[in-house]
Image: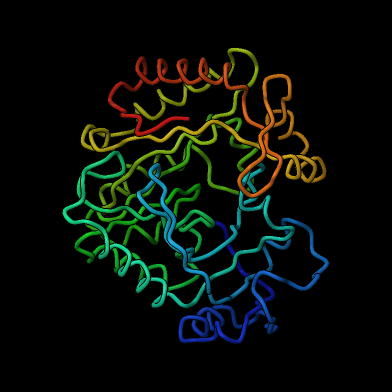
């Protein structure tokens, strides 16, 4: 885990409840500054990565909308945080904000009340689907990395306790970090952690400031033993070097096959998401991480798409992508046939 020790904490007045005050007390040497809105930050004169390292924002989440997902989860829960210590070159959260330090939302009780009301309004028993056979699943980490947030706020553990005890709901989140402190919590399989994986040499280039692929794979058995349900998230799948990406994924699958015990394999499933990139992010990366763009921005095999938010995105040409998906499925069948693909696109 990175040593996140912010030098400045920006906070809104309505964030200084018990949870907010506890976070500030964890960093007694940090300068504190009140701001009016958590999503409109003052100009701090810091670089992209320096902002992620040195700044922490505390706010109150006012819009607590719960969205339908149907892929990684049944629903996307209101965010517990926004932003991440990591600086992944393809991160969709970063592409929507000019500066994106970690923002923790301190009104955890309100957020959990919203989730509880929502799940209790759903038909029960739940109809089994690919997200889970019994419980309604809520993704709690779409806009942040919960493994990092867990070390910053006791509110995240409170959320874990909520889902562990809830008779109808379970939580899920994807992560690129291994937080050993989370192994002290036994969620009794009511929390699904999804370790994001890709070939190691590519991860070193695009998964900036995250834990290594080797470390993530090595942690899977440990998190299963601690009581988590553990899946993997092959995302984003980046196509490069003709057939090189195929051999690299074959090696990744072999690493996974050799690392996992039989009982862990039996419960592990996968999600597969091919790369979508963004024109604004491409321009930003040319200054921040230009080598990554050699893999991410390949117009000759990509097509343009306007996102639902109005952004200009590119993704692999749909005809080529259907072939890529077939190749990926075949590699999985050949190397890790025990790994069920929950969805792939």
Q: Identify the image's colour scheme: rainbow, by chain, secondary structure or one colour.
A: rainbow
Judge from the rendering whether residue 87 lies leftward or rightward of residue 234; answer left or right. Answer: right
Is residue 65 placed above or below 61 in the rendered structure?
A: above
* Viewer-side residue, 59 vs 338: 59
User: Which residue is depicted at the point 58% across and 36% down?
Assistant: 203
Judge from the rendering whether residue 118 lies leftward or rightward of residue 312; answer left or right. Answer: left
Is residue 316 placed above or below 24 in the rendered structure?
A: above
Judge from the rendering whether residue 308 lies leftward or rightward of residue 246; answer left or right. Answer: right
* Viewer-side residue, 268 vs 205: 268
Expressed as whole percent of the image width and height from the top left, the position of residue 261 reads 26, 34
The number of callouts visible is 0
* Viewer-side residue, 186 vs 111: 111
Expressed as whole percent of the image width and height from the top left, the position of residue 40 reads 71, 71
Instruction: Point out the residue furthest to the left here.
Output: 125
Is residue 71 placed above or below 78 in the rendered structure?
A: above
Expressed as whole percent of the image width and height from the top left, the position of residue 81 reads 52, 65
Expressed as whole percent of the image width and height from the top left, the position of residue 45 reads 83, 67
Q: Quadrant of residue 307?
A: top right
User: Which residue is depicted at the point 27% across and 33% down?
Assistant: 265
Is residue 91 placed above or below 141 in the rendered structure?
A: above
């Amino acid at each position: 885990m990175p040593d996140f020790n912010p030098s400045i904490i920006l906070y809104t007045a309505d964030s200084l409840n018990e949870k907010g005050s506890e976070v500030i007390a964890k960093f007694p040497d940090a300068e504190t500054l009140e701001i009016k809105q958590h999503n409109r930050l003052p100009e701090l004169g810091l670089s992209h990565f320096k902002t992620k390292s040195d700044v922490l924002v505390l706010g109150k989440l006012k819009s607590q909308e719960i969205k339908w997902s149907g892929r990684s989860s049944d629903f996307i829960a209101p965010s517990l945080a926004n932003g991440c210590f990591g600086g992944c070159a393809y991160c969709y959260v970063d592409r929507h904000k000019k500066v994106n330090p970690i923002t923790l939302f301190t009104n955890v009780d309100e957020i959990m009340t919203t989730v509880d009301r929502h799940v209790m309004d759903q038909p029960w028993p739940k109809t089994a689907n690919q997200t889970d056979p019994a419980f309604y699943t809520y993704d709690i980490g779409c806009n942040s990395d919960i493994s990092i947030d867990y070390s910053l706020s006791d509110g995240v553990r409170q959320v874990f306790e909520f889902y562990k005890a809830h008779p109808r709901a379970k939580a899920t989140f994807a992560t690129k970090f291994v937080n050993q402190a989370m192994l002290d919590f036994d969620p009794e399989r009511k929390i699904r952690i999804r370790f994001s994986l890709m070939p190691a040499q590519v991860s070193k280039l695009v998964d900036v400031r995250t834990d290594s692929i080797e470390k993530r794979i090595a942690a899977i058995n440990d998190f299963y033993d601690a009581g988590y349900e553990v899946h993997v998230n092959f995302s984003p799948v980046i196509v490069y070097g003709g057939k090189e990406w195929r051999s690299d994924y074959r090696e990744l699958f072999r690493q996974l096959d050799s690392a996992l015990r039989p009982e862990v394999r039996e419960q592990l499933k996968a999600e597969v998401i091919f790369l979508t990139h963004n024109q604004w992010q491409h321009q930003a990366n040319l200054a921040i991480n230009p080598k990554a763009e050699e893999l991410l921005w390949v117009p000759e095999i990509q097509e343009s798409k306007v996102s639902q938010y109005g952004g200009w995105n590119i993704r692999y040409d749909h005809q080529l992508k259907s072939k890529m998906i077939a190749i990926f499925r075949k590699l999985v069948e050949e190397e890790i046939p025990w790994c069920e693909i929950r969805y792939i696109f």
